[in-house]
Image (tube, coloured by chain):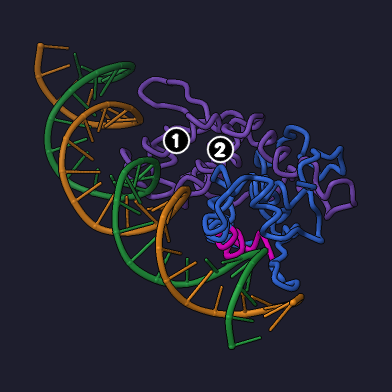
Chain colours: A blue, B purple, C orange, D green
Amino acid sequence: MKKPDVVAALAALAQDNRLDVFRLLVEAGPEGMPAGAVATALDLAPNTLTFHFDRLRTAGLVTVRRDGRSMIYAAQFETMNSLLGYLTDNCCGGAPCLPAAECKPARKRSRISA
Amino acid sequence: MKKPDVVAALAALAQDNRLDVFRLLVEAGPEGMPAGAVATALDLAPNTLTFHFDRLRTAGLVTVRRDGRSMIYAAQFETMNSLLGYLTDNCCGGAPCLPAAECKPARKRSRISA
DNA sequence: TTCATATTTCAATGAATATTGAAATGACAA
DNA sequence: TTGTCATTTCAATATTCATTGAAATATGAA
């Protein structure tokens, strides 16, 4: 992952609503969820949401596919993991660091259903 | 780590020069390096650099201490790791995900000395 | 004190960003 | 076809951001 892509991904995540959107999609897993469901869950105007989806998509953090009239958005896990890798890459120049972040298969936050 | 802090940290990193600065400090390790050395290494105007240091510091990603006339900046590894944790938290809602990012004690990028 | 070095503060400028409202597109049903 | 739902596009606005230049502050040396 090259630096411009890293900056783009970070910028995409560095916004309140987008961070929520992305986390929601991360929880939802590879199958993703329709734009409308995200809008409902996070109480966002549909055009605003489109704007944010666009930024996430441009940053490679999200993919879309159409299903009927719905657009299904899904997190792009590879990009996220590359991003994490870039940030920790070459950490401490060789010295032992703090424990690494991990992709925890965890408890649900029960917000997806809405 | 609360969401506003996560957003602040991501925003702090989501900028070309700051990402370079942070990575340089990550490589430099907990001892940090003087502002002037960072300025030289990255070819940044000192006032511009102060601006960026400020943002990194406000985001909790960096600490400062004075040493003579130099200000020594150092990466705050705990914040970075909390950040990574937040992003991957609850990943895939329970399903197995991609391999986690790790804090790799790695090869030097040979830029610190400048 | 005076001088030089290291870094910060301040003010101004141009560029990028998030949100809104209204209108448009695409897909499906009657 | 018409109507409706889901989402996107467009234009306008207010805010935030990065960079610059000049001046200020703080430390240490002569």
Against B51, residue A27 (above or below) is below
Residue range corresponding to the magenta coloring: A53-63
Q: Residue at x 49, y 43 (%)?
A: B21
- Lower position in the chain sequence, tag 2 or tag 1: 2
A68 sits left or right of B55 in the view = right
Type of amino acid under label 1: Arg
Q: Residue at x 73, y 38 (%)?
A: B85
Q: Which mark is drawn over residue B55? A: 1
Q: Name the residue carrying label 2.
A: B9
Q: Is residue B8 magenta?
A: no
B62 sits left or right of C27 in the view = left
Q: Residue at x 69, y 67 (%)?
A: A71
Type of amino acid under label 2: Ala
Q: Residue at x 55, y 29 (%)?
A: B60
B9 sits left or right of A42 in the view = left
Pointer 1 local density, CA inside 10 Å: few below 14, some 14–19, many at least 20 = some
On the image, the x and y values in percent for residue B96 come to: 90, 52
Please report, as a chain letter, where disc 1 is located. B
